[in-house]
Image (cartoon, grey):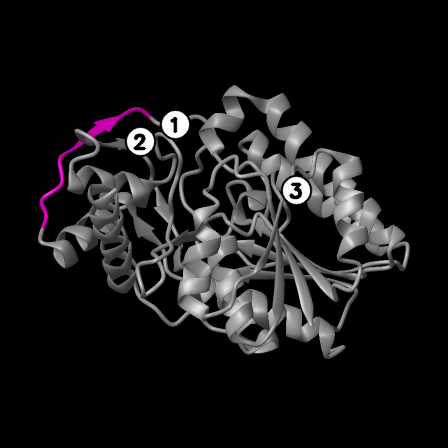
């Protein structure tokens, strides 16, 4: 069975393609390579022994999107990752984020409707909760005002999907991620931001290996035990496996509702300083970091109530923070070795 993965050469997308192929699915990747490299397709093949089909195109291009779906009309489902994803950048460039993230979703849904493709897994985010009033946050929590345009695009996308589902022409599972980190155990794929990283862990590993002079910690006056922001960090491989579970749930007609939402996290919150300390422990490296003011768009603290995903999907995050940091460091070391050999 063939699954389409948009954004499949990206960080979470590439790990999900690996898990899908290892489960026996055939995978078609769509990616415009705006924040990833085509060589990731080679890496996926090295890990799995199977090469996914690759289509380089931008989903903002409606005609190209339609033509691609027509070409692969035998797909049985779609996992939609493709989106701009940097919180800070979205504050600076809101129109770019709305144009890209919303426009691409609408184009994709129109094409899927035309060719009667109904199974859709959406890459959502805990940012739809804003700053939750109650922690841990469950799927039933009211959605707060988004703190960033990026978060708002995820909220609007869920609204679009829910309205589309109500027409009876689409089944959707929306997976609300918390903070994915880490890399595949082979160190052949991992988080590879082009340019300066926007996320904490690649900034940590790049600082440790000498690519960055120091790490900036945004905000020291949050209402947390050490003053730095708290997030629920989840290993990207655990996250990827949840997408395979979601796809199988749809294909086995096991969904309870035509639009389902699940939190994907560990249920544990760690501060920025605790993440730094975990990295220092597993790597033996002492990080240079400096404290700076809060970053616009960031929330204070959030972690997941994962009980619904654990019980209903039969899925649970297995890997702990030190395992996440160790795999991220292995990936950074492998990248450094690869770059030196070029």
Give the residue at x 35% y 27%.
294
Answer with mark 1 or mark 2, whichever residue precedes in sequence.
2
Q: Which residue is mark 2?
A: 218
- Judge by depth and name the residue closer to the eye, 32 or 98: 32
Q: Which residue is mark 1?
A: 295
Task: Identify the magenta region.
Answer: 285-293
Q: Is residue 318 left or right of residue 94?
A: left
Q: Is residue 205 left or right of residue 123?
A: left
Q: Quadrant of the N terminus?
A: bottom right
Where is residue 320 shown, x and y percent of the image? 31, 66
Q: Disc 3 and disc 1: Cα gap in Å?
A: 21 Å
Identify the secondary structure beneath mark 3.
helix
- 37 to 140, vertically: above or below: above
Where is residue 226 shown, x and y percent of the image? 23, 43
Residue 221 location, quadrant: top left
Q: Look at the numbered discs 1 and 2 and tell me whether their residues touch, using CB distance below 8 Å.
A: yes
Q: Quadrant of the C terminus?
A: top left
Q: Which residue is mark 3?
A: 155
Q: Disc 1 and disc 2: Cα gap in Å?
A: 6 Å
């Amino acid at each position: 069975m063939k699954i389409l993965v948009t954004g499949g050469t990206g960080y979470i997308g590439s790990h999900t393609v690996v898990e899908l192929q290892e489960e026996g699915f055939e995978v078609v990747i769509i990616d415009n390579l705006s924040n990833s490299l085509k060589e990731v397709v080679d890496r996926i093949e090295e890990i799995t022994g199977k090469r996914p089909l690759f289509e380089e195109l931008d989903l903002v291009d409606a005609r190209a999107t339609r033509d691609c779906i027509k070409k692969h009309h035998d797909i049985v489902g779609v996992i939609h990752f493709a989106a701009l994803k940097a919180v800070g950048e979205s504050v600076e460039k809101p129109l770019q984020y709305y144009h890209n993230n919303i426009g691409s979703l609408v184009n994709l849904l129109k094409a899927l409707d035309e060719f009667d493709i109904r199974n859709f897994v959406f890459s959502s985010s805990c940012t739809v909760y804003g700053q939750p009033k109650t922690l841990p946050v469950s799927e039933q929590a009211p959605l707060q005002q988004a703190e960033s345009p990026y978060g708002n695009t995820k909220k609007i996308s869920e609204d679009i999907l829910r309205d589309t589902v109500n027409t009876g022409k689409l089944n959707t599972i929306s997976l609300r991620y918390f903070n994915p980190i880490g890399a595949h155990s082979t160190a052949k794929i991992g988080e590879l931001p082009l340019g300066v990283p926007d996320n904490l862990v690649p900034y940590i590993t790049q600082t440790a290996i000498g690519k960055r002079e120091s790490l900036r910690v945004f905000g020291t006056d949050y209402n947390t035990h050490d003053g730095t922001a708290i997030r629920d960090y989840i290993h990207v491989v655990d996250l990827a496996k949840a997408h395979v579970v979601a796809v199988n749930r749809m294909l086995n007609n096991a969904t309870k509702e035509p639009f389902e939402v699940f939190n994907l996290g560990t249920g544990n919150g760690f501060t920025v300083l605790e993440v730094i300390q975990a990295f220092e422990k597993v790597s033996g490296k002492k990080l240079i970091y400096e404290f700076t003011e809060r970053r616009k768009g960031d929330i204070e603290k959030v972690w997941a109530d994962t009980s619904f995903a654990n019980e209903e999907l039969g899925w649970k995050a297995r890997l702990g923070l030190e395992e996440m940091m160790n795999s991220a460091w292995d990936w950074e070391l492998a990248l450094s070795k690869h770059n030196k050999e070029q």
